[in-house]
Image: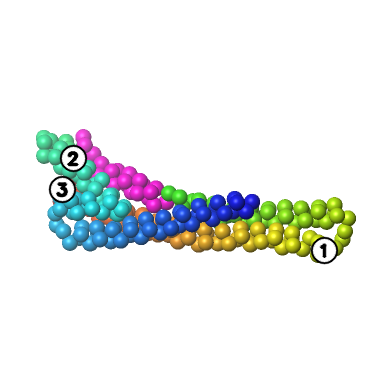
């Protein structure tokens, strides 16, 4: 049981450290990309700048939308008329789908591994409690086999069993705290991606697909 708890602890701390670095980098690069996006007037230049921001989910959503927009504008130039283009090629809806699809991909990356922390937080206290109950039962069975009623004979075994419960709680608490923290940060980045998608679609519809 102790080895199981150690395994949960190592696994959860590995995920915590990795996700903290990943989400911190994602936030930092996304802030940089959004700044570049609003400062520049050229989508091609923004697309070039986004190449170096691979950890930014917002930049990846932009790249998906830009690539689709590029195809649509090329198709629009070769189409007979704007009405035919809009009906046959889907117009802004294609860009919307591409960006929302990429948003889901990026969100899945951000959330990958985080549910394990919730599992750790909810499971390890019960594993620790089970270890304690088993240890107490073993101690009292040993007391019965020794044909003695001296509680001092089982006190060390009970104390050791209780440590298992404490260890389970020690593993669970940081897992729950960081699960909440990381889930909140992932939702914030998801909101940023959704807001950026709306802004980009407005720009695209107004200047490229109208």
How packed is label 2: few (under 14 Cα within 10 Å), some, or many (20 or more)?
Answer: few
Q: Quadrant of residue 21?
A: bottom left
Q: Quadrant of residue 30?
A: bottom left
Which residue is the site of mark 3?
208
Estimate the x, y position of residue 26 in percent, counting from the top left. Answer: 33, 57
SS category of the residue bearing label 3 = loop
Q: Upstream in the sequence, badge 3 or badge 2?
A: 2
Camera-nearest label, 1 or 2? 1
Q: Nearer the viewer, residue 184 or 19?
A: 19
Q: Residue 103: in sight, yes or no? A: yes
Label 1 and label 3: CA atoms lie apart by 83 Å
How packed is label 1: few (under 14 Cα within 10 Å), some, or many (20 or more)?
Answer: few
Residue 71, numbered circle? 2
SS category of the residue bearing label 1 = helix
Which residue is the site of mark 1?
151
Q: Nearer the viewer, residue 209 or 51?
A: 51
Camera-nearest label, 3 or 2? 2
Question: Image height check: is 123 above or below 159?
Answer: above
How packed is label 3: few (under 14 Cα within 10 Å), some, or many (20 or more)?
Answer: some
Please give the range of residues in magenta: 88-111
Q: Residue furthest right?
A: 147
Q: Which residue is located at x 19 percent, y 54 percent?
A: 49
Estimate the x, y position of residue 2 in percent, counting from the top left. Answer: 62, 53
Q: Upstream in the sequence, badge 1 or badge 3?
A: 1
Q: Which residue is located at x 31 percent, y 53 percent?
A: 55
Q: Is 135 within the magenta?
A: no
């Amino acid at each position: 049981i102790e080895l199981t708890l150690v395994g949960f602890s190592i696994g959860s701390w590995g995920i915590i450290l990795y996700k903290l670095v990943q989400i911190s980098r994602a936030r930092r690069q996304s802030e940089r990309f959004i700044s570049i996006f609003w400062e520049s007037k050229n989508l091609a230049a923004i697309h070039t700048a986004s190449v170096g921001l691979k950890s930014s989910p917002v930049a990846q959503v932009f790249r998906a939308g830009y690539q689709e927009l590029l195809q649509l504008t090329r198709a629009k130039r070769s189409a007979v008329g704007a009405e035919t283009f809009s009906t046959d090629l889907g117009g802004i809806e294609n860009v919307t789908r591409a960006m929302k699809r990429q948003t889901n991909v990026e969100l899945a990356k951000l959330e990958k591994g985080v549910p394990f922390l919730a599992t750790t937080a909810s499971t390890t206290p019960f594993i620790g409690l089970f270890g304690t109950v088993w240890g107490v039962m073993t101690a009292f069975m040993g007391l019965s086999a020794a044909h003695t009623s001296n509680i001092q004979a089982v006190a060390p075994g009970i104390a050791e069993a209780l440590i298992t419960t404490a260890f389970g709680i020690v593993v669970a608490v940081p897992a729950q705290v960081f699960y909440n923290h990381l889930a909140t940060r992932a939702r914030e980045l998801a909101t940023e991606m959704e807001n950026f998608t709306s802004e980009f679609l407005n720009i695209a519809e107004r200047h490229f697909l109208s």
